[in-house]
Amino acid sequence: MMKGSCACGSVTFQITGEPDNLSYCHCSRCRKTAGVFAPFLEGSIDDFKLLSGAENIKRFQPNPDMKYVRCFCENCGSALWVEAESKGIYDIVATTLDTDLVTRPMAHIYAASKPNWHDITDNIPIYAEHYRNETKD
Ligand SMILES: [Zn+2]
Ligand SMILES: [Zn+2]
């Protein structure tokens, strides 16, 4: 079982089972809300459980052509996840994890949106948009 939390510790959650994938998202929303890129961990929504802090979670709905609501802690500003229940999955920012992760990153996505001062220097496959060819953010 994996555990995660925001920086102030208000929001805590657990994940059971193996995540499906981990990818680095370089889109403009991740750049502004999570850092230079956001490591998104996805798996079955049934494996995710919020343990505390529901009252501290704020939701940000981007402009209509971007469908997913982004959640963050109102106390400390930690980027938490995007709401992806409609796809049957959790989609959390992996920097919130407090336990080690076996899953390794499999893709850089939305690399076309990364800042020009950030060079990708690893050997993980790079996609201009999403490898699933759909709008995620
Ligand atoms: Zn917090
Ligand atoms: Zn993104």
Image (cartoon, rainbow, N blue to C red):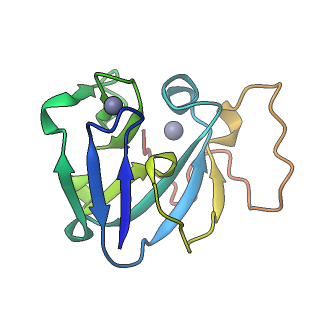
Quarter holding residue 65: top left
**Label total for image:** 0
Quarter of the picture holding the N terminus: bottom left
Q: Identify the residue at horizontal 36%, vertical 60% (top origin).
A: 3
Residue 40 in percent (x, y) is at 49, 52
Q: Is residue 57 left or right of residue 119?
A: left
* Depth order, front residue of 69/67: 69
Split into quadrants, the picture shows ligand 1 in the one at: top left
Quarter of the picture holding the C terminus: top left
Q: Identify the residue at horizontal 31%, vertical 36% (top origin).
A: 67
Q: Identify the residue at horizontal 36%, vertical 43% (top origin).
A: 81
* Depth order, front residue of 121/50: 50
Residue 98 in percent (x, y) is at 46, 55
Q: Which residue lies furthest to the bottom in this view?
A: 17
* Depth order, front residue of 80/131: 80
Q: Which residue lies furthest to the front in this view?
A: 9
Q: In this view, does 32 lie above or below 9?
A: above
Q: In this view, does 106 lie to the left or right of 81?
A: right
Quarter holding residue 125: bottom right
Residue 100 in percent (x, y) is at 53, 66
Q: In this view, does 60 lie above or below 122?
A: above
Residue 64 in percent (x, y) is at 30, 25
